[in-house]
Image (cartoon, grey):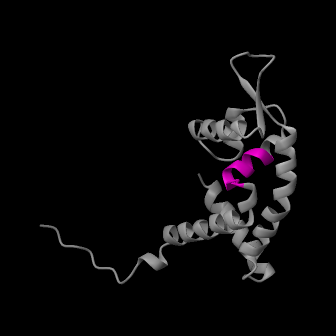
Amino acid sequence: MTKALKFKDPIPNMPGHLFRRLHQIAVAKFALETEAQKITPVQWASLQATHAKPGLDQSTLARDIALDTSTIAGVIDRLEARGLIERRASAEDRRVRILFLTEAGEALLSEVTPAVFEMQKWLLAPLPKKDQIHFMKSMQKLIERG
């Protein structure tokens, strides 16, 4: 029989737990701010990335917003069903589908984006400006270490 390790309430001090909690807060705030538009953070990121690079393919979109290709397919399906994004066959390779925002997609993105950017400020607002910069750089280092 192995002896159980004893830790004094480690969960609140674990980085993974804190990342998860911060993610929960960010997603809840996003949902609150975009409730009327019924859009998720991943859907917004997909619209934003497609707006920035009209004609990108699904694999590039997945890579650009850090999702796997099977997940992005479902996201695109839902956005297409709502008439926000359009898939077209690539002229170079008919097997590849390239993505474009529809007029409705552009309109929704324009409507929602100011609230999304305000929410980003809200997330960091408890920190002094210097700490906000340090926090963002630290998160980027953690993500980029791969």
- Indicate the quadrant containing the N terminus: top left, top right, bottom left or bottom right: bottom left
**How many numbered dots are placed on residues in this image?**
0
User: Does residue 45 sit above or below 128 in this rendering?
Assistant: above
Residue at 72% x, 40% y is: 82
53 w.r.t. 113: above or below: above
In magenta stretch: residue 39? yes
Please state which of residues 5 and 122 is positioned toward the viewer in this rendering.
122
The quadrant where residue 75 appears? top right
For this rendering, which residue is in front, 1 or 24? 24
Q: Residue at x 78, y 62 (%)?
A: 116
User: Mostly what secondary structure, the magenta segment?
Assistant: helix
86 part of magenta stretch: no
The image quadrant that residue 142 belongs to is bottom right
Classify 41 as above or below 82: below
Residue 11: x and y in percent read 43, 76
Task: Residue at the far front: name it.
Answer: 36
29 in relation to 128, above or below: above
Question: Residues in magenta?
Answer: 38-48
Looking at the rendering, which quadrant does residue 37 occupy?
A: bottom right
> Residue drawn at (74%, 51%), measured in percent from left and top?
44
In percent of width and height, residue 4 lies at: 22, 73
Instruction: Tell me residue 22's x, y (percent).
Output: 60, 70
Q: In the image, what residue occupies the spot 68% across and 55% down?
A: 41
